């Protein structure tokens, strides 16, 4: 088994507030040369599953294409589960059912970053000591952004811990005592190409490239997030460039199943399963290759983690969580 060294802590830095509840705070909006105070609107849609305890009347919204998510018309609800943001005109079948970043932070704070599939290899959860976010340049008050992060992350972690503590399961209650409450910080250092920074520049009609002046009638270029991501490790010096839409390494467009295999990222489930299986060799067990990822994950999940996961998604701030597009029962 493995564990994090005693003198090592993990701190998460994010250039913009995590999507979902942490992104709801007051900002300054400039319209028609007049400054107004408005709430930063998160594109993450509020979840209306039975367990989430949110009704349409409460959020004054409309159900999107018979899905479980609602687009709120007015002021957004605070401290609620939300699915990741996306286009509202997508059909329900094509809409992401992945939970928002704010919600995932709470889950990680309780259950750890290692996930249930690696719980046998890493029985002691690896948790974040803090979450640090760059200040939004559109802020009315930095404290408002910090309070939103605190509400979405730290406060809900405390609520989840208390819910597990009184769930009626002794093993789960004991596990809840190991949860460390994370800290939340806002730093003044900003990422110039971050979403909020670029939005500020666009609204203020200021070109990001100050080396040249815009010609009369020339509009500012529109920017959108890149469709690529990069990852690297200390062990493997190769830097992977991932095509976000397909989850494969950049290269020749795959045309068959064999092509996908050659373009697999080291972060994909199959690669993680094969790598972890080498460290979990059991001579009395069948080869890991004979199992699907779901079967392998189920076989290697500690019973306590399975119990905590079940209780976590049934009560407290994460009640009603979607798993595979379905509410945990």
Image: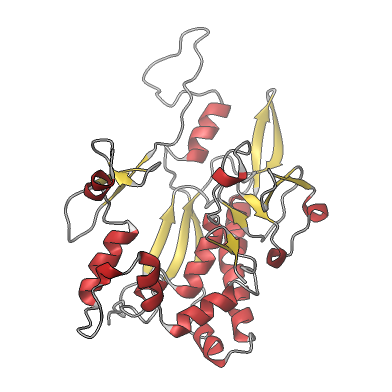
Q: Is residue 114 visible?
A: no
Q: 72 and 18: which one is in front? A: 72
- Does 277 appear above or below 203? below
Q: Residue furthest top?
A: 216
Q: Is residue 128 visible?
A: yes
- Does 206 appear above or below 172? above
- Does 30 appear above or below 260? above
Q: 140 and 196: which one is in front? A: 196
Q: Is residue 82 left or right of residue 273?
A: right
Residue placed at 16% from the left, 53% from the top?
237
Q: Is residue 20 left or right of residue 233?
A: right
Residue placed at 55% from the left, 50% from the top?
84
**Image coords of residue 281 (percent x, y):** 21, 79
Residue placed at 23% from the left, 58% from the top?
233
Q: Residue furthest bottom?
A: 170
**Image coords of residue 88 (percent x, y):** 63, 39
Q: Which of the 4 quarters of the picture holds residue 253?
A: top left
> Quadrant where the C terminus lies?
bottom right
């Amino acid at each position: 088994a493995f564990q994090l060294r005693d003198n090592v802590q993990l701190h998460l830095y994010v250039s913009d507030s995590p999507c979902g509840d942490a992104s709801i705070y007051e900002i300054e909006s400039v319209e028609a040369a007049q400054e107004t105070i408005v709430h930063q609107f998160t594109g993450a849609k509020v979840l209306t599953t039975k367990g989430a305890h949110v009704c349409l009347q409460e959020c004054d919204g409309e159900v999107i294409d018979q899905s479980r998510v609602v687009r709120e018309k007015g002021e957004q609800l605070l401290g609620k589960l939300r699915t990741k943001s996306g286009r509202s005109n997508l059909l329900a079948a094509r809409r992401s059912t992945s939970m928002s970043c704010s919600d995932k932070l709470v889950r990680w704070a309780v259950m750890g970053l290692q996930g249930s599939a690696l719980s046998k290899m890493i029985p002691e959860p690896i948790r974040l000591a803090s979450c640090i976010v760059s200040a939004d340049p559109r802020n009315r008050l930095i404290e408002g952004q910090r309070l939103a992060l605190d509400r979405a992350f730290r406060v809900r972690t405390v609520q989840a811990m208390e819910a597990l503590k009184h769930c009626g399961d002794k093993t789960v209650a004991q596990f809840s005592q190991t949860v460390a409450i994370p800290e939340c910080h806002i730093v003044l250092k900003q990422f110039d190409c971050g979403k909020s920074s670029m939005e500020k520049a666009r609204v203020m009609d200021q070109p990001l490239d100050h080396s040249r002046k815009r010609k009369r009638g020339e509009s500012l270029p529109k920017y959108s997030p890149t469709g690529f991501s990069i990852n690297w490790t200390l062990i493997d010096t190769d830097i992977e460039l991932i095509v976000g839409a397909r989850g494969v390494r950049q290269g020749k467009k795959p045309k068959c199943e064999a092509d996908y295999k050659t373009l697999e990222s080291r972060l994909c489930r199959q690669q993680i399963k094969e790598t972890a299986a080498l460290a979990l060799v059991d001579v009395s067990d069948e080869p890991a290759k004979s199992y699907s990822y779901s079967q392998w994950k189920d076989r290697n999940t500690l019973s306590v983690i399975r119990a905590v996961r079940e209780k976590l998604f049934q009560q407290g701030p994460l009640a009603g969580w979607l798993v595979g597009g379905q509410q945990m029962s």
